[in-house]
Image (tube, rainbow, N blue to C red):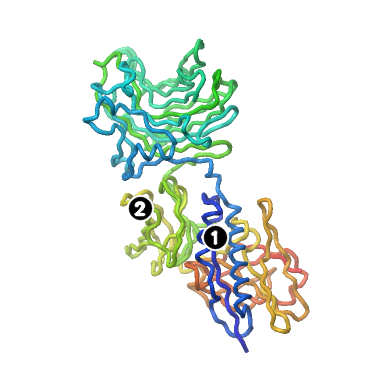
Amino acid sequence: MSTLVSTPGLGKITPSRECERGSNILRSYAAIAIPVHFWGKIIPTVPLVTGIQTARRAALAIRTILEAALLLNVSVLAAQTLLISNGISDPYAQTNQILGALPETPDCAHPAFGPHLIQAFDGALGKSVFVFTLHVVPDNDRCVAFDRQRMEIKVDTTSPPSLKAFLNESVTYRWRFKLPLGFQPSTSFTHIHQVKAGDGDANDPLITLSPGKGNPNVAPDVMRLSHSTGTGGITETIATVQLAPFIGAWVEAYEKITFNHTGKYSLVLRRMTDSAVLLSYTNENIDLWRTGTTFGRPKWGFYRSLIDMADLRDDQVRFDRFCLAKGNDDCPLRTGTDAVVSAANGTPAVSSESIVSFYGLGLTNDIATADMTPLPLTLGNVSVHVTDSAGVARPAPLFYVSPLQINFEIPSGTAAGPMTAAVVNLGTTMALAPANVAKVAPALFTADGTGKGVAAALAIHVAANGQQSVEPIFQCSNGSCFSVPIELGVDTPVFLTLFGTGIRNSPKNVSVTINGVNLVVQYAGAQGSFAGLDQVNVAVPLSLRGTGEADLVLSADGQFATPVRINIR
């Protein structure tokens, strides 16, 4: 009798849906997880993965498996930029860092007031937001123009190419804004959003969104969408609705633009409290390019005429959650249904000590990955607090944080039943999501990250002389993964090592079948060197020789994981 040694897993574990991290992040975390020496669970009966060199090969094979699964899920977020209030950062520096251009402010005319763009807590959203302020006196337009005043953020010539819209390119913008109770628009113009040419014929905006003053006792105030063809052309109102439904309410804007002379444009303004559509406009053939222009760009803020100062008051406009995307990328709608799901297959099944992903929007402005073990409880100024059915709150160990996704381990000791995960960024709760904690929530990692393809697993062959070889059971290329046949010899034992999560809490009640044939489970439980990662070792019977592509089904305590694929020759 000798021993079967479980193979330590490593690499950052990710979910089965699109993620927003790159290979550099994966490699940085995988590097800390590679053991210099081999260790793992000791199980009686068969000699397996003995010797330091074989162990190192096994460790590298696991990293190859897990990294391959992750790299196929590199997100399209690379072309997506988020600017979200965090309540802490200097908003001038923050907008400059993210948009690549400094705000346009009236500070030079009114230094005693201080910054005209600040961050402040908003009770309706339950978080900090950007507040744009203008005073009738003495604010102006950057101490250059005195018949108007401006507090705007923008994409500009100094911005990165990913934020500029070039000829024939399509962009998507999503953002939130709120006009306060009593808001007084100018009789001339008050713009809260502009789409402009970046150069060339750039004086008149291509598109403006403007609250407009009505005629007392005759016509109400309006929200006006306008289009201009530029110098010597025409400027016209293309959509208008009453302003009253906007006042005092948070509104989410969703805008899609294709930049050329026969471009496309759409804008939907939706009130957040009841999802009522306040304005909707679409045009499939609209001139959105200018003579001498090399790029288009957006602006947001508070920009108004001072021609009729008596009609104005010191006022504010609030904004938050700016999203800029390009090409086929999109800015996802945040509906309030943030979700916690298994990191292995994206299902809502989770358990204590399982690896999960929190999906949301604007969870943080940063991307950070853990570079230490044990895992940190705060990463990139973000923490996750899990409150279980017994009312006990625990901090969660963190693998990875980003604006759209946070990977963490459900804290040990979390009671079964309903739980709530709270994402906290610098003391501000950014999002809440419920989940239901079960005793077990078995899920297996797959090579392509879908949770349904070929298993992220190792085949271990033991020769008659005791020599062992460790091989991944898949290959990936050109964005897809396929199975590599497991060779079953006449008298050469073959073992399969599977990696998953949510299994460890019922190690004696784990079963595995291939094509309906029960396999002998040599070990099931915690992998031992990587938080939340579980490992299952099974012996592959010679009777399965020639099976070909087949489903492998794992269950724990009667709960079934999503089937994965293997190939046996």
Residue 149, quarter of the rendered image = top left
Residue 268, given in percent of the width and then of the height, sits at 47, 30
Of residues 183 and 87, the one nearer the viewer is 87
Of residues 479 and 107, the one nearer the viewer is 107
Q: Which residue is drawn at 42% across and 67% down?
A: 374
- Asked which secondary structure carries label 1, the reply is loop
Q: What residue type is labelled 1?
A: Ala
Residue 254, given in percent of the width and then of the height, sits at 47, 33
Task: Please state if 346 lies on the left or on the right of 394 as rendered.
Answer: right
Residue 49, given in percent of the width and then of the height, sits at 62, 78
Residue 511, quarter of the rendered image = bottom right
- Residue 521 has which mark? none
Choose mark 2 or mark 1, whichever is in front.
Answer: 2
Q: Residue at x 33, y 28 (%)?
A: 105
The C terminus, quarter of image: bottom right
User: Looking at this rendering, what residue extends furthest in the bottom direction?
Assistant: 1
Q: Distance between the residues labelled 2 and 1?
A: 24 Å
Which residue is under mark 2? Answer: 424
Above or below for 394 versus 116: below
- Asked which secondary structure carries label 2, the reply is strand
Residue 62 visible, this orientation: yes
Of residues 209 and 50, the one nearer the viewer is 50
Residue 126 visible, this orientation: no
Q: Which amino acid does label 2 sit on?
A: Val
Residue 485, quarter of the rendered image = bottom right
Which residue is under mark 1? Answer: 344
- Identify the mark nearer the N-term, 2 or 1: 1
Residue 467, given in percent of the width and then of the height, sits at 69, 80
Classify 10 Å Cα crowding around label 1: few (below 14), some (14-19), many (20 and above).
Answer: many
